[in-house]
Image (cartoon, grey):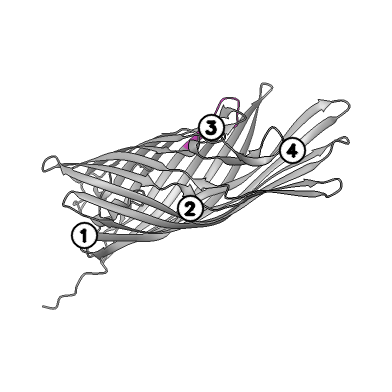
Amino acid sequence: MNGASLGLRQGNFINTLNPASYSAVDSLTMLFDIGVSGQTTNFSEQTNGVTKRLNTKNASFDYFVSSFRLLPKVGMSFGFLPYSNVGYKYTVKNYIDRTNGTVTEVHNGDGGLHQAFIGAGWQAFKSFSMGVNLSYFWGTINREISTSSTTNIQSLSRKYSASVRNYKLDFGVQYEHQLDKANTLTFGATFGLGHNINADYTCLVINKTNTDTTSYVVDDALSLPMSYAVGAAWKHDNRLVVDADVAMHAWGKLDYPGINSEGKFVAQSGILKNSYQVRLGADYVPNPQDHRKFYKRIHYKLGCGFTTPYYNIEGKNGPSEISVTAGLGIPLQSSYNNRSFLNVSAQWVRNSATDMITENTFRLNLGITFNERWFAKWKIN
């Protein structure tokens, strides 16, 4: 469903995007969800009327999460989720003139942040639930810009790095309203706590000619933004679910380290901007109770989304994102378990902006949801 889920509240899958949903898991169930993905990305750029293209491929382990009923009306979840990923390498060549020749810049980036979390959801009243996710995230981000020249222009290398070890808090609520016997409307909202993550950002300027190195550090340079999201889900006859969400991340209130017009490495405003996101998704199953016709118990899912950029590049908006997803939830049958699912989805993502590189990514996601009745009591007749 392309991430649309703030109003989703069902006991047969784990909705980590709104921790209030954890209270929907029943007292007999133990859920495990594991996911991997592979993707191919096409980069294209217009230069002097000529289109240049490059294709890349990679695969990754995406997540592991689990959920179960901890206490009456209280559900719990824990697991591992990715938070961010950095990986790029590209070259920029600029011809100055006959005297100074060509200057080449090589840009590299690698690293990322990982996230382990534990969360709980409590059904405070019949129709109202609340929840919280507490995450610990860690990792290192490295970036480098290295210049070289065909003449005697000074060659420099600038290396940026930051190491992160901190926490993250996300809160969620859900209100469920029964319209009639066949229709239910659930409203959801989440709030992410913004705060400084006590991570210093270091810049090393290395003169390749004489190996002189100058170090600059911006203390407590990085922060998490406040985030707000609201959504609603309509469920019809336990066969159709439609969810729509809107979210905002307040990056615009945060400063970010960079080299200013005076050549100093300092925290600057105006580099980041608020990001907005809209997502819409649907899940349809013809007849979940039909045990004769297998295809009628398959879940058919669609989703789409649009996200605005959270950063500026040389005073211009960064790339915006459009995404579309289609997938299947295929029930796994066995002599003891008929509630687990194999989830397969394909996603297309396009990142583009005027006069910038365009990215088109095709991603294949594969996940397995194990739905086990671990806590059922044996009865001897």
State the CA–CA distance, disc 3 to disc 4. Answer: 22 Å
Toward the viewer: 370 or 338? 370
Residue drawn at x 16%, y 52% is 126
Q: Secondary structure at mark 4?
A: strand
Amino acid type assigned to the residue bearing label 3 in the image: Pro
The quarter of the rendered structure image containing the N terminus is top left
Mark 4 or mark 1: which comes first in sequence?
1
Disc number lying in front (2 or 1): 1
Mark linked to residue 73: 1
From the top left corner, tell me how far across and down residue 247 is, in percent: 38, 38
Mark 2 or mark 4: which comes first in sequence?
2
Amino acid type assigned to the residue bearing label 2 in the image: Pro
Residue drawn at x 81%, y 41% is 155
Disc number lying in front (1 or 3): 1
Residue drawn at x 33%, y 42% is 301
From the top left corner, tell me how far across and down residue 317 is, in percent: 54, 29
Toward the viewer: 51 or 89? 89
Q: Is residue 18 left or right of residue 149?
A: left
Q: Is residue 68 left or right of residue 250?
A: left
Report the span colored magenta.
349-357
Q: Which residue is mark 2?
A: 82
Q: Is residue 182 above or below residue 273?
A: below
Mark linked to residue 319: 3
Q: Secondary structure at mark 3?
A: loop
State the CA–CA distance, disc 2 to disc 4. Answer: 30 Å
Q: Which quadrant holds residue 314?
A: top right
Mark 1 or mark 3: which comes first in sequence?
1
Q: Which residue is mark 4?
A: 105
Query: Is residue 30 in sight in this rendering?
Result: no
Query: Is residue 100 in sight in this rendering?
Result: yes
